[in-house]
Amino acid sequence: MDERTAHVPKRSRIFSPGWQTFLAVMGPGIVVMLADTDVGSIITAAQSGVQWGYRLLLLQLLLMPVLYIVQELTVRLGIFTGKGHGELIRNTFGAGWAWVSVSGLGVATIGALITEFSGVAGVGELFGVSRAVSLSISTALLLAVVLTGSYRRVERVAIALGLFELAFFVVAWRAHPQSAELAAGLVHMPLQDSAYLYLVAANIGAVIMPWMIFYQQSAVADKKLQPCHYRHAQYDTAFGSVIAQAVMAAVLIAAAATIGKVHAQAASASLNSIGDITKMLVPALGPSVGRVVFGLGTIGAAMVAAIVVSLASAWGFGEVTGYRHSLEHHPLEAPWFYGIYAVAVIGGAVIVDLVPDLVALNIGVEVMNALMLPLVLGFLVLLAFKALPAKHRLKGPYAWLVVAVSVLTAGLGVYGGITGVHLL
């Protein structure tokens, strides 16, 4: 029995075979992927459908394997080292690089939380609930979930909230997209257009975000998954990758099939908030689907993302500084960990309440994520070569595939973001 296994309770080391093992291991991948389709991602997908019809739909499908390849590395690193992302960077490259990485995480956290709370406030206002009330209720819920629970309880609550995102499939189905138009859009990608490239960058940044990498690796370590759970953890990540991009595709299809038809000047339509999207969906889908169903999906996406983003930040800073950073500790035993989480949640809500126009930065936040990809993916790939036990390091054709996918994804994200910067 190695040192890591010795600290794992017997019931968490011995699972029943088959699907019961998968259900026991499942969580980090599903949760982080549900959080991946956050409010900023929803707005980015909707804007993509409004401005370009189905011409960015193929990108959503192509990003499925990319998302899996990236997040699978976090599973591999978490299981075979037992360490979170920030701690592994600190141990492998030194404290200076760890602070560089976690600083990028901090910036991404601020941007993400602004979009999540903006979405919550926007849905509340659609139903006549004031911004202050909706933000206060959501903040209290987010604090209660983490401050009064273990990792498993937090995971279950996050999955339950994320299931509301399935509402987006109802919205896409009720939009009745035309198969001929959809097929034509799949094969037409105007890569010479800077506005198109800008949304390409935004969509890439909406799929691969710094906090996702920190969260999943730290969650795998906090859940104390062992090498015998590796295969099931890969299934967890693969299933989550498909769900995440299917949700993005559903939102894009709904926007392209409804808003694009109802509004003749859709290409210039401004969708900077959830309110903008729902108001444009209502004429085509009716108030029940356009407002209630879309609102429920948005609330689920915003809440699960807020949990994941805030925890990723608390884990990341804890791993770099060395303070206790586990949900298995009582708040009094890990005050800095829970304090960072609380500050992130409360701070995000306060910013949105005081400066509501920040919601217009949604797509800009996703482009910022894309511009950070060289740093984020660079650390991740280097760790997969240097920090893993020799048996589990990247090697052979798959290693070349991971490097190629990472370089192409980061390069396209940066190129698209820089090319379209004049559109800001």
Image: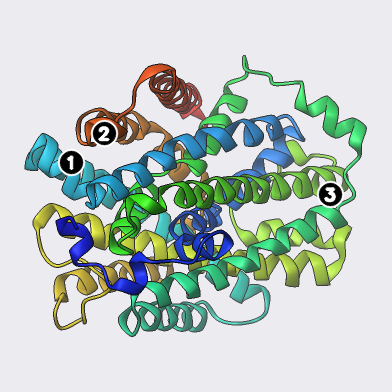
Q: Which residue is mark 1?
A: 89
Quadrant in the picture for residue 62 = top right
Q: Position of residue 94 (x, y in %)?
A: 8, 38
* Rendered-image quadrant of the N terminus: bottom left
Residue sitting at x 90%, y 49% = 176
Q: Nearer the viewer, mark 1 or mark 3?
A: 1
Q: Earlier in the sequence, mark 1 or mark 3?
A: 1
The disc placed on residue 294 is none
Identify the amino acid type marked 1: Ile
The answer for how far apart the CA atoms under marks 1 and 3 are is: 46 Å
Quadrant in the picture for residue 220 = bottom left
In the image, 119 versus 213, the foreground residue is 213
Residue sitting at x 15%, y 71% = 336
Asked if labels 2 and 1 touch by Cβ distance under 8 angstroms, the answer is: yes
> In this image, 184 relative to 208: left or right?
right
- Secondary structure, mark 3, is helix
The disc placed on residue 258 is 3
Residue 346 makes an appearance in the image: no
Q: Residues within 10 Å of mark 2 (few under 14, many from 20)?
A: some
Q: Which residue is mark 2?
A: 379
